[in-house]
Amino acid sequence: RGPRPPPLGSNRLKILEVMHLLIGLKNSEVDKVMIELGVLPTCLDLFFKYEWHNFLHNLVKKVVEIVVKGENEELQRTLFSGEAKLLERIMDAHHRNEEECKQAKATRKGYMGQLREMANMVVSESVAEREEEGAASNPGAAMMRAALDTEEWRAFVALFLKPLNEMHDKLIGRPQPGGVYSDDEEDMSPGPA
């Protein structure tokens, strides 16, 4: 397992919140500085370093969403094929998590839910862009599709992501024939006072 990293701390979390807001501005000059400073790779580094920091994970997921759904091709290139290497990190984390979960008394990493959501977001955005080919679509769509069009990513989606999504989409418990409550159940609402 190795030594635990030092606490993230509220100051660094606040700095990440500011980075999230700055990227959310969708200003080309601000985005250029974010690329120069390596904000996206740093966000992902922290995401994986602090595997149990839910606030951090959700914040990084929001940053990734802004970039994936945004129109800045350079930010998208940085996220997918630049230093950040989002897809590779997602696949590596899933493979490492699968291997670690085979050990006795192992638990899933705390960020696995957010990783699944990021992977699904990338896949759905890619599909949406493909369907909007003729319209004024995301300028980074072709680059994003090229990043997704690898044997490794297709295998990951087919062997890991699709079964994981199917498992999460299953209804838990016994479904009632008439919906949530059956007609046989008594009305539990209080009567007239």
Image (tube, helix red, strand yellow):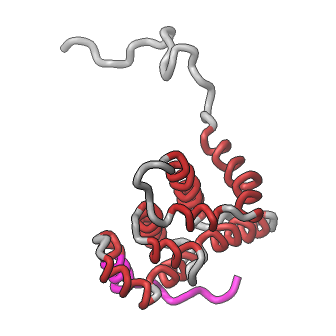
**Residue span colored magenta:** 1-19
Q: Where residue 8 appears, x then y in whole percent?
A: 45, 84
Residue 191 in the image, given as x and y percentages of width and height: 27, 13
State the image quarter where residue 51 is shown: bottom right
Q: Residue furthest front?
A: 134
Q: Quadrant of residue 81?
A: bottom right
Q: Position of residue 140 (x, y in %)?
A: 49, 66
The reply to whether residue 54 is in sight is no
The residue lying toward the viewer, choosing from 142 and 110, is 142
Residue 193 placement, left or right of 91 = left
- Regarding residue 148, the answer to whether it shows in the image is yes
Q: Is residue 171 above or below residue 176?
A: below
Q: Residue furthest left?
A: 193
Asked whether, in this view, residue 188 is left or right of residue 122, the answer is left
Q: Quadrant of residue 32?
A: bottom left
* Residue 92, position as x, y percentages in the image: 70, 72
In reply to whether residue 11 is colored magenta, the answer given is: yes
Looking at the image, residue 117 sits to the left or right of residue 147; the answer is: left
Of residues 33 and 102, the one drawn nearer to the viewer in this rendering: 33
Q: Is residue 128 above or below residue 50?
A: above
